[in-house]
Amino acid sequence: MTRYVALLRGVNVGTTRLAMADLRRIVTDLGHEDVKTYLQSGNVAFDSTVRDAEKLAAGIERALADELALKVPVLVRSGRELAAVAGGNPYADREDDPTRLLVAFLATPPKTSTVDALTVPGGENVSFTVTGREVFLHFVDGGYGRSKFTNAYLEKKLGVVSTSRNWKSVRALAEMTAA
């Protein structure tokens, strides 16, 4: 068995409502074990014998659509991948406030040309580092809530589906998926 986390984009922050009990049931019904959610924002950790993260994500997406009529992008990371993210934040030693550190998880690695063209909008004081399928973000002068450097902005500029989590959530999910 491998421990994974599924990250659902846009759940319980806008019009897309999903009870975490329903999410746990759906993931359990797909045959996964030790299913646990974190917060109300679409984070679910589970064990699975399936070794293909894309297949896991597609199965959860399909079940959400079939059972609850929800079209929600799902990104899956293994516990090992999440541990690497939690241990690889280039800004963690510069910031004590976890609300100023975020990670945008990307469905696929972006094209080099889109990464090279990525800039911070409107002169905001935001540092970012794109590493594989993650974008590490440091909001130097404030939080994510007032910034234009949002998940939607990243999706548009990088051309890939993404979902963002604050540093506190990233660390908690890494703990939930630790071997």
Image (cartoon, grey):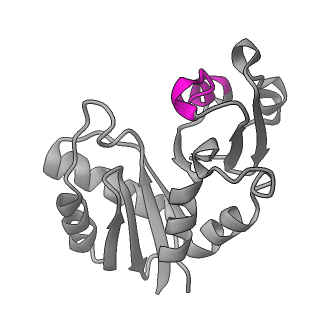
Q: Whole-percent x and y of residue 71? A: 29, 39
* Closer to the camera in the image, 77 or 141: 141
- Name the residue located 71 percent from the left edge and 12 percent from the top edge: 122
Query: Does residue 151 show up?
Result: no
* Residue 105 x %, y %: 59, 48
Residue 121, position as x, y percentages in the image: 70, 17
Residue found at x 78% / y 35%: 127
Q: Can residue 166 be seen in this snapshot?
A: yes
Image height check: is 134 above or below 168? above
Q: Position of residue 89 (x, y in %)?
A: 75, 57
- 77 sits left or right of 158 in the view: left
Q: In percent of the image, x 76 and y 15: which residue is there?
A: 123
Question: Looking at the image, which residue sits at the far top?
Answer: 122
Q: Quadrant of residue 38?
A: bottom left
Q: Quadrant of the C terminus?
A: bottom right
User: For the magenta stretch, what is the residue range?
Assistant: 144-157
Tell me the chief SS of the magenta region: helix
Residue nearer the viewer, 123 or 65 = 123
Q: Is residue 62 left or right of residue 157?
A: left
User: Does the segment drawn in magenta span residue 153?
Assistant: yes
Image label count? 0
**Left or right: 159 as drawn, with respect to 59:** right
The vertical placement of 29 against 126, above or below, is below
Q: Residue at x 78, y 32 (%)?
A: 115
> Within the magenta stretch, is there residue 156?
yes
The correct choice, above or below, for 127 with respect to 19 in the image is above
